[in-house]
Image (cartoon, rainbow, N blue to C red):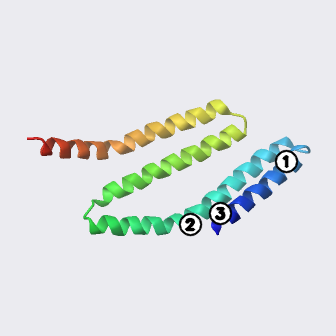
Amino acid sequence: MEIFQVVAIGLVAAILSVVLKNQKPEIGMYISIVTGLIIFFFIATKLQAVIEILSQLATKINLDSVYLSTILKIVGIAYIAEFGSQVCKDAGEGLIASKIEFAGKILIMVMAVPILVSLMDLIINMVP
């Protein structure tokens, strides 16, 4: 199972980080970033199957592809903002982490506006 591989990568990185922090403290941050990227790309390859299934489902129900791509972009923004925030927190930069989280939330809100407008139009057209 993939989760065992992810956990193994994380544990090896944590042990390396702890061992090497005594000699060079900045190494811990680099190990954290590289490990995060390795896990992110490992998992990102698994998302391709999910995206294909969602695309097929959207085609079956005649959902405009703009909505599906917008939702996927929103999810991507959330994951990337969370990853960046966690890296900054690991580096001891909590203030920068909170700014990344804030920017991610604003970008998600901006991306969601077309969907919200479409939903409001649908509600307005349903009300007599």
Name which residue lies at 32% across and 54% down. Answer: 67
User: Marks 3 and 1: which is nearer the front?
Assistant: 3
Q: Give the mark nearer the N terminus: 3 vs 2.
A: 3
Within 10 angstroms of label 3, few (less than 14), some, or many (20 or more) residues?
Answer: few
User: Separation of disc 3 and disc 1 at Cα?
Assistant: 22 Å
Q: Is residue 89 left or right of residue 19?
A: left
Which residue is label 3 attached to? 3
Q: Are marks 2 and 1 in contact (CB under 8 Å)?
A: no
User: Separation of disc 3 and disc 2 at Cα?
Assistant: 14 Å
* Quadrant of residue 107 within the rendered picture: top left
User: Marks 3 and 2: which is nearer the front?
Assistant: 3
Name which residue lies at 49% across and 67% down. Answer: 48
Q: Secondary structure at mark 3?
A: helix
Where residue 57 sits: x, y (%)?
34, 67
Where residue 18 sits: x, y (%)?
85, 47
**Circle 3: residue type:** Ile
* Quadrant of residue 124 within the rendered picture: top left
Disc number placed over residue 18 in the picture, else none: 1
Name which residue lies at 72% across and 35% down. Answer: 92
Which residue is label 2 attached to? 45
Q: Is residue 16 left or right of residue 73?
A: right
**Circle 2: residue type:** Thr
Q: Are marks 3 and 2 in contact (CB under 8 Å)?
A: no
